[in-house]
Image (spheres, grey):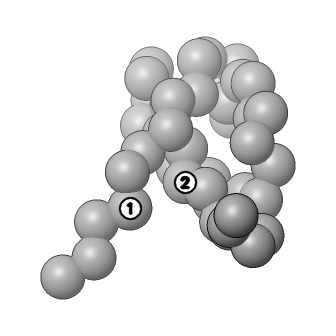
């Protein structure tokens, strides 16, 4: 059980990144490319 969690997505075409709580972010709002989930990297 995970509370509301921010997800980070990166466009495979233009590398535009967006952080959202929506798990169903479909396409890049900048170029319309495919968005893929990015694993959070925290030191
Ligand atoms: Zn894009």
What residue lies at 18% left-to-right and 82% top-to-bottom?
A: 43
Q: From the image, which quarter does the N terminus lie in?
A: bottom right
Give percent across and percent down for residue 32: 70, 19
Quarter-wise, where is residue 30 in the image?
Answer: top right
15 up-or-down from 34: above or below? below
Whether residue 16 is visible to the viewer of this picture, yes or no, is no
Q: What residue is disc 1 on? A: 40
Q: Residues within 10 Å of mark 2 (few under 14, many from 20)?
A: some
Give percent across and percent down for residue 12: 43, 23
What residue lies at 45% left-to-right and 20% top-to-bottom?
A: 13
Q: Which circle marks residue 3 in the picture?
A: none
Q: Quick one: which residue is furthest to the front in this view?
A: 1
Q: Quick one: which residue is furthest to the left in this view?
A: 43
First reached walking from the N terminus: tag 1 or tag 2 = 2
Q: What residue is disc 2 on? A: 8
Is the residue under label 2 in contact with that under label 1 (CB below 8 Å)? Answer: yes
Q: Residues within 10 Å of mark 1 (few under 14, many from 20)?
A: few
Quarter-wise, where is residue 4 in the image?
Answer: bottom right
What residue lies at 55% left-to-right and 44% top-to-bottom?
A: 9
How many numbered marks are there? 2
Give percent across and percent down for residue 37: 50, 38
Horizontal arrangement in the rendering, residue 26 relative to residue 6 (left or right): right
11 up-or-down from 42: above or below? above
Q: Secondary structure at mark 1?
A: loop
What residue lies at 58% left-to-right and 28% top-to-bottom?
A: 35
């Amino acid at each position: 059980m995970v509370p509301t969690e921010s997800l980070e997505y990166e466009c495979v075409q233009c590398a535009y990144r967006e952080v959202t709580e929506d798990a169903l972010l479909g396409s890049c709002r900048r170029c319309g490319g495919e968005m893929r989930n990015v694993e959070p990297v925290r030191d």
